[in-house]
Image (cartoon, rainbow, N blue to C red):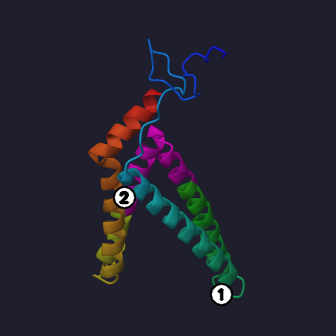
């Protein structure tokens, strides 16, 4: 019978770490549901922005507002792609992505409040929905479990 490899027993199963040696490497932190939920919100928002950007670009072809609508569609598509890249980085535990998502979420919540204030209350339900979604996103990313996850991920 041959001698088992270091860190493994005779049946090729990992042993518990001995003297700091781990056959598998450092364990990655378990991603909490708050982070997964926030990333899902970012992905959904990104896909929606890309889809609306495509629609705006197509509608802009035959419209009187053609050029401005095409520009708005292009900007929405870029913002959607950035949102999806941000979601991916959040899932991977990147602290910069968390900070960026929190700042953008707060700015989005504030910007959703402005149109109803300027138009004597028109669009309040849409503004409420936008503010609520962004507050939930920020809350998920600032939850204690999310903070622990990002702190543990940045240590690796």
Residue located beneath label 2 in the image: 137
Q: Nearer the viewer, residue 113 or 34?
A: 34
Foreground mark, 2 or 1, reads 2
In the visual, does 94 lie left or right of 81? left
Q: How far across and how far down the image is residue 86, in percent?
A: 52, 51
Q: Is residue 71 visible?
A: yes
**Quarter residue 68 falls in:** bottom right
Q: Identify the residue at horizontal 62%, vertical 78% (top origin).
A: 56
Q: Is residue 119 visible?
A: no
In the visual, does 51 lie left or right of 36? right
Q: Nearer the viewer, residue 19 or 79?
A: 19
Seen in the picture, residue 126 relative to 30 is either above or below; the reply is: below
Seen in the picture, residue 114 relative to 123 is either above or below; the reply is: above
Q: Identify the residue at horizontal 67%, vertical 81% (top origin).
A: 66
> What span is in magenta?
85-108
In the visual, does 156 lie left or right of 132? right
- Tag 2 and tag 1, C-beta contact below 8 Å: no
Q: Secondary structure at mark 2?
A: helix
Residue at the farthest right position: 61
Residue located beneath label 1 in the image: 64
Q: How far across and how far down the image is residue 52, in percent?
A: 58, 75
* Residue 136 is a magenta residue: no
* Residue 97 is a magenta residue: yes
């Amino acid at each position: 019978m041959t001698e088992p490899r270091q860190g493994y027993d005779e049946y090729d199963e990992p042993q518990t770490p001995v003297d700091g040696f781990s056959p598998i490497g450092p364990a990655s932190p378990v991603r909490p549901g708050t982070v997964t939920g926030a990333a899902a919100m970012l992905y959904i928002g990104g896909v929606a922005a890309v889809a609306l950007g495509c629609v705006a670009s197509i509608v802009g072809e035959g419209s009187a507002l053609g050029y401005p609508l095409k520009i708005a569609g292009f900007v929405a598509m870029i913002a959607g792609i950035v949102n999806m890249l941000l979601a991916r980085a959040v899932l991977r535990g990147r602290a910069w992505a968390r900070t960026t998502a929190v700042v953008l979420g707060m700015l989005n919540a504030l910007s959703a409040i402005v149109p109803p204030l300027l138009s004597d209350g028109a669009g309040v339900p849409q503004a409420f929905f936008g503010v609520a979604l962004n507050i939930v996103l920020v809350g998920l990313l600032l939850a204690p479990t999310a903070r622990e996850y990002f702190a543990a991920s940045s240590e690796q």
